[in-house]
Image: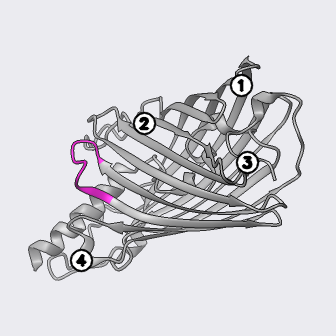
Amino acid sequence: MKKLTLYILFLVAAYGYGQELNLPVFTQYLADNDFVISPTYAGIGDNLKIRANGLTQWVGIKNAPDNQSVYADFRISDRSGVGISAYNDKNGNTRQKGVKFSFAHHITLDYKTKQFLSFGISYNINSFRIDIENFNTTYDIPILDPAITDDRSISNNNFDAGILYRWKAFYLSFNANNIMKKDIDPYTGIEPSQLLNYQIYTGLVIKSKQNKDVEFEPSLFYQMFDSDKRSSTDVNFKYRKFNRRGDYYFLGGSYRFLNDQFFKPLNLGPMAGITFNQFFFAYSYQFTINDLSGYNSGTHMVTIGLDFLQGISNCECTKGTSQSYYR
């Protein structure tokens, strides 16, 4: 039992270490908020879009990761958009906060065939610290190390860049996150300086031939870390049903796996959401399918949002692939 407890604690710590300066991506982007994935989506659509997420991971395990984030993007001209996102992440005695400022520009490749290209960049400010005020003595460690006298905090700046291609109802984006090397303490020697990771997001919005108010959206999200080449993939599917006023609800699911372990999923879970009078609400649940599954009840995420200040662009390049962009 003691070995199992140590193993669980190791996994919790290892996951937190791996997500440092990388906001954990679960299904936030599937809550009709592609801006989570890439700055290239800033300004696409007819509204100022705001989304707030609350995520509790591995419910049932003490000091498991907990995250809150907010995203907002809007168009500033016929072809450009800006966005901002902020997050607060807690993992045991570690605290991480950050904010991103994003800009995107959209161009038309071919008007007749509805081909568009978008470029985006984000400037990131991140801070990371250890909560020493929560350190407790134990039987094995009856006295805390007197050398620990501050919160061991550190701040870093970085950049993300991305490109998005759209052709009618098809979309494909490529992003490079944390392009610059991270500033580290040269005396510790245990922190990675390279946090660069690549993300590919692609999908297709399929309109039902029997009902014009119904959409199907299969999609894939791929992420690879440059430091050790570890990678994972999400296989997603969504169903949307609109009413005459443009409000809608959606149902879907996501299957996440390491790319060398397709039949051993990390997470598997359903999701659902609804919009009504410019208000958005969504909930997703992910089953943990690994050695931790017997010790927690999964990961829960709630998203609330608002879409308002509608303004139609004169350029087709800011149109989205789904009716959900225009309500």
Q: Nearer the viewer, residue 201 or 182?
A: 201
Q: Which residue is mark 2?
A: 183
Q: Are marks 2 and 3 in contact (CB under 8 Å)?
A: no
Q: State the separation of the CA atoms marked 2 and 1.
A: 43 Å
Specify start and end residues of the magenta stretch as a single range: 258-266
Q: Determine crowd level at label 1: few under 14, some 14-19, many 20+ residues with C-alpha closer than 10 A.
A: some
As shown in the figure, which amino acid type bears the numbered disc 3?
Answer: Gln
Residue 235 visible here: yes
Q: State the separation of the CA atoms marked 3 and 1.
A: 15 Å
Q: Give the x, y percent position of residue 19.
A: 39, 51
Q: Which residue is mark 1?
A: 114
- 19 vs 206, left or right, is left
Q: Earlier in the sequence, mark 4 or mark 3?
A: 4
Q: Which mark is residue 294?
A: 4
Residue at 63% x, 58% y is 240
Q: Which residue is mark 3?
A: 323
